[in-house]
Amino acid sequence: MKKRTFLAGVAATALATAAFAGSHGDGPVKVGFVYVGPIGDGGWTYEHHQGLLAVEEAFGDKVETVYQENVPEGADAERAMTQMALQGADLIFTTSFGYMDPTINVASKFPNVKFEHATGYKRSDNVSTYSARFYEGRAVQGHIAGKMTKTNKIGYIASFPIPEVIRGINSAYIHAKKVNPDVEFSIVWAYTWFDPAKEADAAKALIENGADVILQHTDSTAPQAAAQTAGNVVTFGQASDMGEYAPFPRVSSIIDNWGPYYVQRVQAVMDGTWASVDTWDGIGPGMVGIGEISDAVPADVKAEAEALRDSLASGEYHAFTGPINKQDGSAWLAAGETADDGTLAGMNFYVEGITADIPN
Amino acid sequence: MDLSSINPILLIASLMVASTPILLAAIGEMVAEKSGVLNLGVEGMMIVGAICGFATAVETGSPFIGFIAAAAGGAILSLIFGFLTQYLLSNQVATGLALTLFGLGLSSLMGQSYVGIKPPATEKLDIPLLSDIPAIGPMLFNHDIWVYVSLALVAAVWAFLKYTRGGLILRAVGESHDAAHALGYNVIFVRLAAIAFGGACAGLGGAYLSLVRVPQWTEGMTAGAGWIALAIVVFASWRAGRVLLGAYLFGGITVLQLNLQAAGVAIPVELLSMSPYLITILVLVIISSDRNRAALNAPASLGRAFHASH
């Protein structure tokens, strides 16, 4: 056999296999995960990987999982997704905001493959979106931060100026301000989800500028280490518990819990009931967890924070309840009014009192 | 604009810390390139150094032994590259890229059980008298030993290349390996030594990240520092002094822009974020802009394979 015909034969067989696997008659359901960082980041990607493990645990042999780590947001993401779809994946979870357009593009080429995009807002017949109401957790953090700060300066390491991050800043600020009217936020944009050295530098810069509480919206534990070195700085675990820095500097955390959702969606594919939906769950349904509030927090503050958490979970209190003005002083929410999901999903403004500008 | 919250003493102190990993990696790569070897595996060697140093420091409790292990780890990895490119004559660019991928994978395998562990602290030197000088003391003379080692290395590399016979041989090998071979110098040995030195320096740079600057082990923690080091070598037109300038500019502006953001300075964040790349490239391009001299500085045999039978 000539080399070229041999190669063509191999390619044809591979394609046929892929097509066959794609139809998954009796074979296992193949689930793909695209990760923005390494699974050992101790934060965001780590928790998505815990979700993958939960899927394997729940379905055993009936499911086959593949994942790819460190996939950059952009053109390379399309390649990774296309590859998974060609390998016969039935369901692909793309777990970062920046995969939004790549997911839509690849999904249009593979109408029989189901896609689930985390934290985005673009859907189609075979693309669902899912996210967690992290801002509920930010409210609890803001409350504790406002009570714990002595310099009245709270540092915030932000990643990218997208609605999810801005919601977090606003929610934390509103609740910190509520318990401590003198509080000020200084916000540093790192323009990365994961770069331990840069996150550490950002934390140090904030600490050197007088912040004694650091909130982070980046994925590694580097800011926790920087706070620990500084000695008297409070931090919160982000995406994952980051419990190795408890009880101090890490006094509490927001924990993303994707497992139940992933299991439910894989089940839907198996049952043939999968449909494109938009899921946005908070503390109540358990998608957002509040990590244990450590004893470094005074008992009364801890009790208040837990009460806040419970009222957010029961739905009795909304983290964005008026009166709230926008940064420019114009009215946003009247007294008692709560924010609608549409505005929150596209949030591109700071609330009144934050002095910085949002980068474009 | 309120700059009062920025403390210049702390700023310069953190600038030096932030620049050291890139400086170490860049000065090592410069020596390798001066010998005519283009090793694109800096990122891979750095991260292997980071985990070797971290693991060893945790196991032995001594950061110093950790740094030594990091240098050894980086050097060993670089010698794989050396063997492939010098004896098997593989393509240097492809092999270097493969080395980076290999290093990233190997390090995350080695680091499995070290996530979330805190390393022993690297002591800061307390230099008598000098550390007590007001302002300048805490700024310049209150760092860990590796900051000074990196500066000493730059000076040593500069002197070695400029004044010693060994440096002359190294440069000869990098300029024209055939001529050096004809003169009786062992081209492959010189290159292997330069590659190993580059690997050891990259390893030290990685360990500085995982043991001092961050300090913890996280997968993929170099996050592109190795590529910055490579770029600095080129923009510095293969001169030790300019490598130092480039690394300090890059590290310094990174820290400065974060500080400006933290202080709430009204400069658009996008500009601040791109400033380290922009200013470093601009400055180095401008000082290296004398065409004739810049062209002289690029080693003529850079990236070319050598085979003695020619």
Image: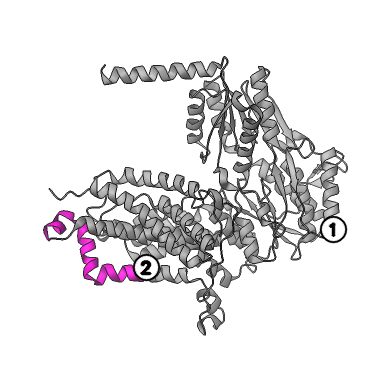
Residue type of the residue flagged with mark 2: Val
Magenta portion: prevailing SS class: helix
For residue A283, the mark is none
**Residue B292 visible here:** no
Q: Is residue A138 magenta?
A: no
Does residue A61 sit above or below A326 in this rendering? above
**Residue A177 horizontal/vertical position (percent):** 80, 55
Residue at x 58% of width, y 55% of height:
A199
Question: Is A122 rendered above or below residue A220?
Answer: above
Per the model, the C-alpha gap separating discs 1 and 2 is 54 Å
Which residue is disc 2 drawn over? B154
Question: Badge 1 sits on which subunit?
Answer: A
Give the extent of the magenta segment.
B155-184
Residue A98 is situated, as x and y percent measured from the top left of the image, at 57, 38
> Judging from the image, what secondary structure is the residue with disc 1 in?
helix
Tell me residue A90's x, y (percent). Answer: 57, 22
Quarter holding the N terminus of chain B is bottom right
The kind of residue tagged 1 is: Ala
Q: Return the x and y of residue B241 as percentages of the image width and height.
A: 36, 67
Q: Residue at x 60, y 23 (%)?
A: A62
